[in-house]
Image (cartoon, grey):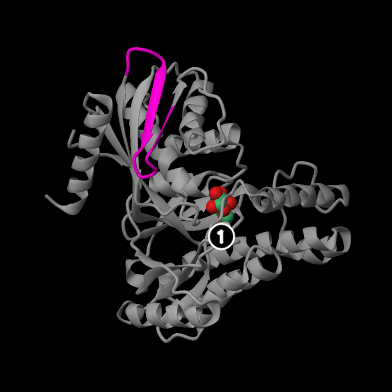
Amino acid sequence: MNAKNAWVERAHSHFSEDFGSSAEWVAVAPGRVNLIGEHTDYNEGLAVPCAVDRRTLVLGAPRGDRKVRVHAWDLDEAGEFLSDAPERRESWLDYVQGVFFALAERGFDLPGFDLGITSTVPLNSGLSSSAALGVALVAGLNAGLGLDLSPSDWARVAHRGENGFVGVQCGLLDHFASALGRERHALRIDCRSQTVEPIPIAGAGFSILLVHSGVERRLADGVYGERVAECRRALGAAQAAGIAPPSARALRDLSEAQLPRLERALDPIEFRRVRHVIGENARADAFCRALVEGDTQSLGTLLAQGQASLREDYAVSTPELDWLCELGSRCDGVVGSRLTGAGLGGFTLHLVVPDQLEAAREQIGEGFRARFGRLPESLTALPSRGAYLEDSV
Ligand code: GLA
């Protein structure tokens, strides 16, 4: 039995011990790392993530009543709610309840379930553990109840659960990456048209190294919501000044050519947020072209420009994240570095020539220890397939 099957088998045993019955389905969804296109999704822009080989398993069996019992084995915690009456608890259980809420909103009448969860996606680190949980749960309920939802819908339902129930105003990036990831591919996600194009990266000749800044972050923290609000205000101000048409829906509707007028019309902070979003959309497109062409020099330049913009214009970097990127830029074999995810903590991303991966990991780790007094955790991530159902049940 390989390691993955052993994991699934263990989860089955836990399920039977806890609930006294067998799981009827096992759904799997991965975390994601965003290569570029940060804070663009809720502005209807472009993002380029890949799903990674860290996954969440959700096991489920329907019940004869409305009760939903959930065991989070890694946390050693359990919770309960009614399938037709989720109520916010301000805990991980809300991510489960959010899916029931979003499916009810689509008109599905859900029975109760016994559910078990286990995961290898690091929590609160910017690798989208919450999206992996939501997408796996939708995929499982979809299979168990024959709801006939597509993988894009799994993403939309999980996203709606986070937005509409948990109250995190995140965009679609994480859920689409988790639902639609492909082995050896990045995804170019157009968050306006909600189209996803797989971009092969095998030929680009790099490994993905992630180094943790040691600072945890949660989207529910205020800064993420502040940025979302600043972007909305900036769009309103651009419309009031006659720069964006009244029909504009998001910062995606603004262009680089408008920057000089925007600078005169907007308050300086809002202007900087807009400049980041406009530049980041262009970088995301250029990054996809460089991936296809195997142009590693451009990849590195775009990552460095992205990091500078996240630090200076979007103000979501930290001294730890900046330092990890700086260390990356000093290593042989590191193509480029930047923070990944929402920022303000979590991981930095380093694209590294494969045979120099271990040397880079060590050099970055030691450089971080010299300044911050501790060795950072790190992991390598493989671009992986999106959510699926285990068929071994
Ligand atoms: C978090 C959110 C995403 C996205 C990124 C920033 O991961 O969940 O929707 O906004 O931050 O790019």
Which residue corresponds to the image point at 67% horizontal and 52% vertical from the top-left? 252
Give the image location of residue 332, x and y in percent.
42, 87
Which residue corresponds to the image point at 48% horizontal and 82% vertical from the top-left? 367
Q: Amino acid at mark 1?
A: Gly
Observer able to see residue 26 = yes
Front residue (pair 91, 120):
91
Which residue corresponds to the image point at 32% horizontal and 51% vertical from the top-left? 385
Q: Provide the residue designation for mark 1.
A: 37
Q: Residue 145 lies in what quarter of the image?
A: top left
User: Residue 40 lies in magenta, yes or no?
Assistant: no
In the rendered image of this protein, does residue 82 appear above or below residue 205? above
Farthest left residue in view? 1
Q: In the figure, is residue 114 to the left or right of 303?
A: left
Front residue (pair 86, 40):
86
Observer able to see residue 146 = no
Q: Residue 309 lies in what quarter of the image?
A: bottom right
Farthest top residue in view? 64
Give the image location of residue 213, x and y in percent.
51, 67
Quarter of the image with the C terminus is top left
The answer to whether the residue bearing label 1 lies less than 8 angstroms from the nearest atom of ligand 1 is yes
Number of numbered tags placed on the structure image? 1
Segment tinted magenta in the rendering: 63-79
Give the image location of residue 182, x and y in percent.
34, 53
Which residue corresponds to the image point at 44% horizontal and 82% vertical from the top-left? 366
